[in-house]
Amino acid sequence: MSGAKEVWFYHLERRTLEQTLPMLLERTLDRDWTAVVEASSEERVRALDAFLWTYAEDSFLPHGALGDGDPHEHPILLMTGPANPAGASVRFCVDGADPLPALQAATTPYERIVVIFDGADEDALARARAQWKAVKEAGVAISYWRQTPEGRWEKKA
């Protein structure tokens, strides 16, 4: 598989997805990368779309959902499914979205795929463990990030 140079797993324990995702997306844009955020449902895409416009009083993240005009116009594209219509550099898999289809899509390789999962949800933990195992078996570089008690991210594997 050559669909990504590396896959990073982020284990949420002290912050929610809504508290974590904007920071990671800001860092992505700071690198002049573009991103796809893959959610598990259209309803979740709509919720994230509304949230990213209002998550902070003094800023917003430029983004759009698939279907909001030309995908190439959006530095951050929210969607369901494994496609990469604008050739994004980074893919964020949230709410249980599976990174494996994107890894197998060698036509549009990513710099990085980021899997974010909720450590308080047993189903999410089990799914992330299975995804970790599958990514590792695929031979892709893999990292595991966990929050410290202070809320910072620390690479654990």
Image (cartoon, helix red, strand yellow):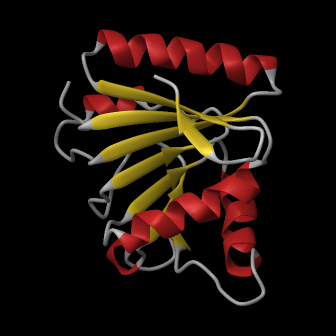
Q: Position of residue 9 (x, y in %)?
A: 51, 32
Q: Is residue 150 left or right of residue 11?
A: right
Q: Is residue 118 left or right of residue 80?
A: right
Give the quarter of the image for residue 128: top right
Residue in the image at 51% along x and 69% along y: 26
Tag count: 0
Q: Is residue 141 above or below residue 39?
A: above
Q: Position of residue 127 (x, y in %)?
A: 62, 18
Q: Name the image quarter holding the N terminus.
A: top left
Residue in the image at 30% along x and 35% along y: 6
- The answer to whether residue 89 shows anywhere in this view is yes
Residue in the image at 32% along x and 59% along y: 88
Q: Outermost residue, bottom direction?
A: 58
Q: Is residue 66 above or below residue 138?
A: below
Q: Position of residue 51 (x, y in %)?
A: 74, 70
Q: Residue 44 versus residue 29: which sits nearer the camera?
A: 29
Q: Residue 111 versus residue 36: which sits nearer the camera?
A: 111
Q: Is residue 72 above or below residue 122?
A: below
Residue in the image at 38% along x and 34% along y: 7
- The answer to whether residue 66 shows anywhere in this view is no
Give the quarter of the image for residue 120: top right
